[in-house]
């Protein structure tokens, strides 16, 4: 078995934002069949990429997964992505990614958002998933909690 670190970014700006993140982490623990290894403090931020009256609560959570030697990173990443999307749906997120007429992503309010940030040293680039997350280095709401976790380890 191989130990692989999985970093997930979580954000919420609808309802009880703190409770939404706590609930999502609890569901991730069950679905990934392991408790998280580390979680950052919650960070409150303005929306990124759109206007909203409600600020986001964000966190980064680290899981250490036990995967078989020689696992397929893309296939495993897509399975993790489906777990994240399923949790988003169960928590009330109805819209999938939307795009404008130019093909740019349109962001909106949501009860929970779960992004795969890093998956070991793997690089995944397929239509459904890009790892490392292509925008994470531009987002303080990802990088600040990510640095916090790494400074604790």
Image: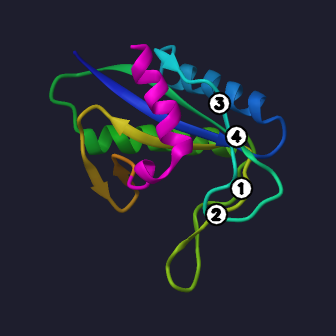
Q: Earlier in the sequence, mark 1 or mark 3?
A: 3
> Gap in Å between the C-alphas at discs 2 and 4?
19 Å
Residue at mark 3: 24
Is 28 rendered above or below residue 79? above
> Gap in Å between the C-alphas at discs 2 and 1?
13 Å
Residue at the far bottom in the pictured view? 101
Q: Residue at x 65, y 30 (%)?
A: 24
Residue at mark 2: 107
Helix, strand or loop at mark 3: helix
- The question of residue 151 being in magenta is answered with yes
Q: Earlier in the sequence, mark 3 or mark 4?
A: 3
Q: Earlier in the sequence, mark 3 or mark 2?
A: 3
Q: Which residues are magenta?
A: 134-153
Task: Tell me the mark number nearer the camera, choosing from 1 and 3.
Answer: 3
> Gap in Å between the C-alphas at discs 3 and 2?
20 Å
Measuring from the top left, give residue 83's x and y in whole percent.
52, 37
Q: Earlier in the sequence, mark 2 or mark 4?
A: 4
Q: Which mark is residue 94?
A: 1
Measuring from the top left, give residue 132's x and y in whole percent.
34, 46
Helix, strand or loop at mark 1: loop
- Quadrant for the C terminus in the image: top left
């Amino acid at each position: 078995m191989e130990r692989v670190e999985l970093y997930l970014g979580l954000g919420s700006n609808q309802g009880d934002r703190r409770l939404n993140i706590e609930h999502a982490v609890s569901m991730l623990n069950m679905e990934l069949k392991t408790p998280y290894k580390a979680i950052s403090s919650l960070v409150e931020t303005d929306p990124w990429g759109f206007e909203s009256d409600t600020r986001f609560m964000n966190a980064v959570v680290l899981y250490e997964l036990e995967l078989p030697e020689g696992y397929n990173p893309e296939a495993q990443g897509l399975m993790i992505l489906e777990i994240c999307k399923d949790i988003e749906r169960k928590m009330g997120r109805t819209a999938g990614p939307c795009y404008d007429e130019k093909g740019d992503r349109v962001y909106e309010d949501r009860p929970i958002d779960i992004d795969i940030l890093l998956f070991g040293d793997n690089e995944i680039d397929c239509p459904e998933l890009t790892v490392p997350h292509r925008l994470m280095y531009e987002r303080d709401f990802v990088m600040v909690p990510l640095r916090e976790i790494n400074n604790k380890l």
